[in-house]
Structures are given as structure tokens and as C-alpha cells.
Amino acid sequence: MKKLLLLLLFIPLLSFGQKLNEESNGYFEVVELKLSEKEIQQKINEWIDFKFLVEINNIETIITSGNFTIEFNLPGGLASIDYYFQNKLIFYIENNKYKIELKPTNYSAVRLRYNNIVENIDNDENHTVLPDGLKISDYMMLKNLSKETFAKNREDFVRKNLSRQGLNESTVKFMLTKEKIDESYEYYLISKNKWDESISRLFLDIKSHINLAVMLKKFN
């Protein structure tokens, strides 16, 4: 029993080793361990359970689809939006190792929260822009955007939206002077941290389940 408690204590210390793939549209991590392909497949299937929809499941590859939700706070702190992210979660299995690959695919705003009120957002379209005019690729970067880059992205987004509404250039410039970049950037950093934590938590949850099997095997 003491050995098991020690194992459970050390599992959360396993590294957050996910990296961006070459296309910068997904995360991956390769984990080596002393389990056979069949044992790895079994432990992955145990972890998947009903969390994800399984599309392909064999000794070499497991392909699933699922979703996760992240609440992004809006500048001012009085409101937030829940975004629903669809993704592909793929496992590649070889003897003594497996590769986790997570690819966010589509996403949409699903709930607006303000003054302790929650409203569903009726929108069936997939979005390409998140709060402040950012794209999902901005959140997937391993480093935070600099304030300068964030400000430029934000200005381009606001300018495009105001111009689309038919406002003239002088009005657009005036509206841009009202932008509170420091405050917006602060909330971007909060949202980026939530994103990073969600991704890391998913990878850690998978590794913890499988690595527990390895550690217990040593004591059998």
C-alpha cells in the first residue's frame, strides 16, 4: 500500500513534454516504456473509455475524435465566452513506445457568461477567430505573443470589423484610440494560460494512466 501511494505521488511529476508538430497545427509526444504493444493498446483503450469516439482501433494505431471546452475571459472581467474545441486524438503504438498526437480541428463559441447569467450562443458555423482577433494558431504557439504583436493583431481585427460596418477611416482611427491594449493583453495572457493548461492536463492524464500500469507491473 505504501508503494502504491508513493507511485501516485510521483506520477504528476512526469514531464509536460508535448511539442508542436512541423505544420504547427497539433501537439505530439513520444513516450517510451516497458510494455508490449498489446499492453499499451489495452491501457490506452482503458483511458479512452467513453471520453472519445473511436474511429480506428488496432495494435498499431488508435484514432479518436472528441472535444474540450475552455472559458475565455473578455477584457473588463465582466463577461466570458465558452469555446468548444473539436479535435483528433491519435495514438501510434510500437513495442515499448507510443506517440500521442492531438490536433484541434474546428471550434465555436457556445456560451456567453455575464452577471451570473449563462446564455447559449446559437451558432452552427465554425469560427476562425477567437477573442481579440486571434486565431487558434496564436494560442498553439509555445511562447506567448509579445504585446507588440498582440496589439497589431488586435488593431487589424478591429479595423477590419469597423470598416466592414461602413465606418469611414477617421471614425475607425478614433475608435482605435479607445482601445485598451494593456487590459486586452492581460486577458489574452490569462486565456493563453488556460489553453496551455488544458493541453498539458490532457497529455498528463494519458501518461499518468499508462505509466501507472508500468510502475505497478514492477511490483507484481
Image (cartoon, rainbow, N blue to C red):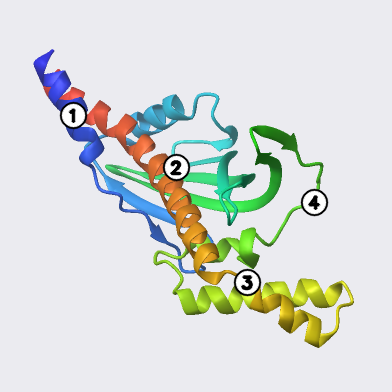
Q: State the image coordinates of residue 69 (x, y, percent, origin top left).
A: 58, 40
Task: Give the labeled residue for mark 3.
Answer: 179
Q: Nearer the viewer, residue 44 or 172?
A: 172
* Location of the C terminus (image quadrant): top left
Q: Secondary structure at mark 2?
A: loop
For disc 2, the marked residue is 60
Nearer-N-terminus badge (2/1): 1
User: Label 4's element?
Assistant: loop
Mark 2 or 3: the one toward you: 3
Of pointers 4 and 2, the one earlier in the residue sequence: 2
* Mark 4–mark 2 distance (CA, rounded to whole Å): 35 Å
Kind of residue indicated by mark 3: Glu
Answer left or right for 13 relative to 29. left
* Crowdedness near tag 2: few (<14), some (14–19) or many (≥20) residues, C-alpha within 10 Å: some
Q: Position of residue 51 (x, y in %)?
A: 54, 29
Q: Which residue is mark 1?
A: 9
Q: Is residue 85 above or below residue 39?
A: below
The residue that disc 4 covers is 125
